[in-house]
Image: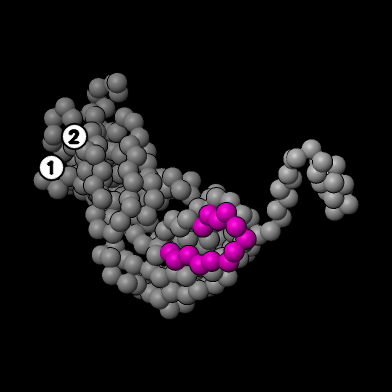
Amino acid sequence: MKRALLTLAAAVLGTGCVVNDNPCGTDVALTWSFTDETGAPASCADLGMNYVDVWDGGSYLTSYSCVGSGGTAALPTLSVGSHTLVVEGVHVDTSGTITTIITRDFVDASSSTCTSFGVSATPGRGVLRMNYTLTPTNACVPSDPGSATGIWYTVDDLTSGAPLDSIGPGSSLADRGAVLCSTTNEYADVFAPYGGYSVSAMAEVSNPTTPSYATESRLCAPVEVDVGTWGTTNSPVLSLLDVGFACP
């Protein structure tokens, strides 16, 4: 293969053309530290993280053990060109099969030369607040036996392509009744690593902790929200339409 490339180069030298065969890679040192939802520095133990996963765009690159409040490591060699690294603090369960993303950051590691360089990431998280209202009448439905209706939802992580959080029929009884319908505090909060999200489902549900639960009103279309900083990021007001009315 080298001989073929050399022959090609020799053939075009006399024409004034230039062959740019640049097989080199770039050595990148990654440094990371973490912040929590208040913006305060946090350790792996503080947030329950045991690994740091690194992705190059949508392609898995490597993982490191999460120890202390940060670290530095040499990444696998990157090609010269454009790279957006996704650096995540995650918790992997004891079976090694369930990974929960706790914090995240996006880092530009693009390079036009083969020169080594370093980049820094600060994976963090915020609070995604899903604000809702009930329509056409903003009133929670009475629920038997006299308990409040619940709010169920599904939030999808657009970066990982996996659900971030959900409350629904498959949740524990405690979770199914964890968010009660209200017309004074009309929201549900979830921790969200930095990134984009889709509130793909939300509903007011009567008798949420019983087998006879029923949907009373629902979100008609997904709504996307970007969480880019610590603190609380408010969604647009999500209109939950009574099931007696057809979605537009």
Q: Who is closer to the viewer here, 9 or 70?
A: 9
Tag 2 near tag 1, CB within 8 Å: yes
Q: Position of residue 120 (x, y in %)?
A: 44, 66
Q: Which residues are magenta?
A: 109-121
Say which amino acid is labelled 1. Thr
The residue at which mark 2 appears reads as: 134
Please give left or right for residue 241 compared with residue 86 in the image: left
Q: Who is closer to the viewer here, 183 or 77?
A: 77
Which image quadrant for residue 219? top left
Q: Position of residue 109 (x, y in %)?
A: 51, 57
Q: Position of residue 188 (x, y in %)?
A: 24, 49
Would you say residue 10 is visible in this rendering?
A: yes
Q: Residue furthest left?
A: 184
Please give left or right for residue 48 compared with residue 242 in the image: right
The residue at which mark 1 appears reads as: 183
Q: Who is closer to the viewer here, 201 or 74?
A: 74
Q: Residue at x 24, y 39 (%)?
A: 236
234 over 45 or under it: above or below: above
